[in-house]
Amino acid sequence: MAYTTHINSTSTGVFGRIAEFRRSLGERSARYATYRKTLKELSNLTDRDLSDLGIHRSQIASLAKDSAYSF
């Protein structure tokens, strides 16, 4: 005897996938904007300001990435 089950879920339909894609795209866009803003602000600091914060200029990209993409 065989059984089949059909679960109708809006989130797995075409519109649900489109909505999920748009949400994901918006989240990725926001994270990238945070990365760019952090990178720009830290890059605009002088070496002395960075030194006061305990940051070397070579760490800026890594810090910006951690700021935007780490959870």
Image (tube, helix red, strand yellow):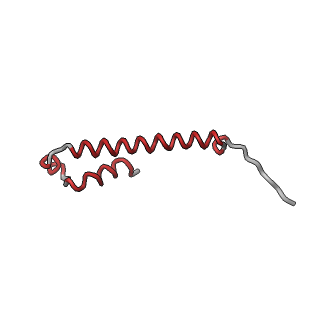
In the rendered image, the residue lying farthest to the bottom is: 1
Q: List x then y, in percent, for residue 62.
A: 30, 54
Q: Is residue 53 left or right of residue 24?
A: left
In the rendered image, the residue lying farthest to the right is: 1
- Residue at x 25% of width, y 51% of height: 60
Q: Is residue 19 left or right of residue 8?
A: left
Report the number of numbered marks. 0
Q: List x then y, in percent, for residue 16.
A: 62, 41
In the rendered image, the residue lying farthest to the left is: 48
Q: List x then y, in percent, for residue 20.
A: 56, 42
Q: Is residue 52 left or right of residue 18?
A: left
- Residue at x 18% of width, y 44% of height: 45
Q: Is residue 56 left or right of residue 29?
A: left
Q: List x then y, in percent, for residue 24.
A: 50, 44
- Residue at x 38% of width, y 52% of height: 70
Q: Is residue 64 above or below residue 30?
A: below
Quick one: quadrant of the N terminus? bottom right
